[in-house]
């Protein structure tokens, strides 16, 4: 592979560090561990150094050895030099693995789509593993930064509480506010497109209102709409409305003069030109607004709960557990929010790929 030529220094450095770690553990009397590390170092880097070959066997070999070495090293978390040398070697090995996955020949069909996820999954797993190792080796207090294993344990033990918070914040607050804000923005965009007065008057005011800080508007919404989810939905509406409006208006104006002249040549009405030309051409802009609004919706719902909420919700739980120094629960809520937001964004990206398949941004390499 071409990537093997580009990362030759990484491979040599990783193998040397791993062998030094093996020598260091051997000098402290951990001979079985030293032998394991030496074998893993050779298996991990030597096939790549010999140039074998462009297939998945090499990637699978590196992945298996990285996984084995990672689990072998966890119980030996310490501040010794050999340990950190091996950790650095494994990080270089993970770097090599991600590079191989990114540069590997693309498969077709469902296998190709699954293949595109391997590199980010490997990168994310490496970060989580480094987080676990550093917290254990440096003995970081859990009130400062809990290990991923503690966060996972809290996730498993608190699924009922996390589900109630998820329903309150994401489904009731974020999704309802998202639907109302996005729908209203689409309707107003059509009105703005038909009226120069609204285009010149509403959009500048909208940009001003969109710049208002959420920490200033959220308490007002709570006082207006109460402490339950309607106030959180109102905050979300205020956050997503104007980004969606601006993107839609820009999308409706994206067609060029020749395309509009062609529709006039066909004697098309405003509605026909909108449905057959301008709205399809605006879809990339609309989906861009939808994806931006998807991230703002969850953020707005969570932050709004800091200023008043019933005894449930992600924002309420985060603020409460921080006061109790239960940082593992805080990180569990953050993990659920991140997963929900990523899935929501991914669904919108898949819908965009299906609707705007004709756009240059969706063409496959």
Image (cartoon, rainbow, N blue to C red):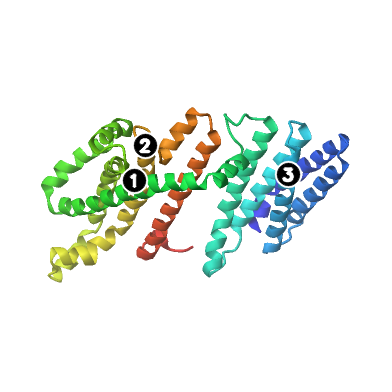
Circle 2 is placed at which residue position? 305
- In the depicted structure, whether residue 324 falls above or below residue 295: above
Q: Secondary structure at mark 2?
A: helix
- Judge left or right: residue 115 versus residue 26: left
Please tell me whether mark 1 sits on a helix, a strand or a loop: helix
Q: Position of residue 123 (x, y in %)?
A: 59, 48
**Tag of residue 339:** none
Of 246 and 255, which appears nearest the observer? 246
- For residue 173, the mark is 1
Q: Is residue 276 left or right of residue 50?
A: left
**Quadrant for the N terminus in the image:** bottom right
Calculate the distance from the C-alpha at mark 2 to the C-alpha at mark 3: 47 Å
At horizontal 33% and vertical 57% (from top left) the residue drawn is 284
Q: Is residue 37 left or right of residue 195?
A: right
Measured Cα–Cα span from mark 2 to mark 1: 10 Å
Q: Are marks 2 and 3 in contact (CB under 8 Å)?
A: no
Q: Which is more N-terminal, label 3 or label 1? A: 3
Which dot, 1 or 3, sits closer to the camera?
1
Q: Is residue 109 above or below residue 4?
A: below
Instruction: Tell me what residue is drawn at x 26 percent, y 54 percent.
Output: 251
* Residue 338 percent coordinates (x, y): 47, 45
Query: Can residue 338 be seen?
Result: no
- Name the quadrant containing residue 194: bottom left
Name the residue tied to disc 3: 14
Proximity of marks 2 and 1: CB atoms separated by less than 8 Å = yes
Q: Position of residue 227 (x, y in %)?
A: 31, 37
Q: Find numbered disc 3 in the image and state the secondary structure of the residue it sits on.
A: helix
Q: Of 104 and 154, which appears nearest the observer?
A: 154
**Residue at screen point 38% across, 65% down:** 354
Residue drawn at x 43%, y 40% is 314
């Amino acid at each position: 592979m071409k990537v093997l030529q580009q990362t030759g220094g990484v491979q040599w450095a990783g193998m040397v560090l791993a062998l030094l770690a093996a020598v260091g553990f051997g000098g402290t009397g951990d001979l079985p561990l030293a032998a394991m590390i030496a074998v893993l170092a050779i298996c991990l880097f030597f096939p790549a150094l010999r140039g074998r070959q462009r297939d998945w066997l090499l990637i699978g070999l590196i992945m298996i050895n990285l996984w084995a070495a990672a689990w072998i090293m966890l119980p030996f978390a310490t501040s010794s030099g050999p340990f950190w040398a091996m950790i650095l070697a494994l990080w270089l090995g993970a770097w090599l693995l991600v590079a191989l996955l990114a540069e590997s020949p693309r498969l077709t069909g469902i296998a190709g789509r699954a293949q595109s996820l391997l590199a980010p999954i490997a990168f994310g797993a490496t970060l989580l593993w480094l987080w676990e190792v550093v917290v254990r080796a440096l003995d970081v207090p859990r009130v400062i930064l809990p290990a991923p294993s503690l966060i996972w344990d809290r996730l498993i033990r608190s699924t009922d509480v996390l589900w109630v918070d998820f329903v309150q914040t994401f489904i009731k607050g974020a999704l309802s506010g998202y639907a109302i804000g996005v729908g209203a923005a689409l309707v107003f965009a059509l009105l703005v497109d038909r009226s120069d007065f609204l285009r010149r008057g509403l959009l500048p005011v909208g940009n001003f209102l969109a710049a208002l800080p959420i920490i200033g508007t959220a308490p007002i919404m709570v006082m207006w709409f109460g402490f339950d989810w309607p106030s959180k939905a109102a905050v979300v509406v205020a956050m997503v409305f104007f980004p969606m409006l601006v993107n839609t208006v820009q999308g409706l104006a994206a067609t060029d003069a020749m395309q509009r002249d062609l529709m006039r040549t066909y004697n098309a009405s405003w509605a026909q030109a909108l449905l057959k030309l301008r709205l399809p051409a605006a879809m990339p802009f609309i989906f861009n607004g939808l994806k931006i609004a998807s991230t703002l919706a969850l953020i707005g719902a969570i932050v709004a709960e800091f200023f008043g909420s019933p005894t449930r919700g992600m924002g309420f739980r985060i603020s409460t557990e921080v006061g109790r120094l239960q940082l593992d629960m805080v990180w569990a809520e953050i993990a659920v929010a991140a997963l929900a937001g990523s899935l929501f964004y991914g669904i919108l990206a898949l819908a965009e790929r299906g609707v705007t398949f004709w756009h240059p941004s969706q063409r496959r390499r």
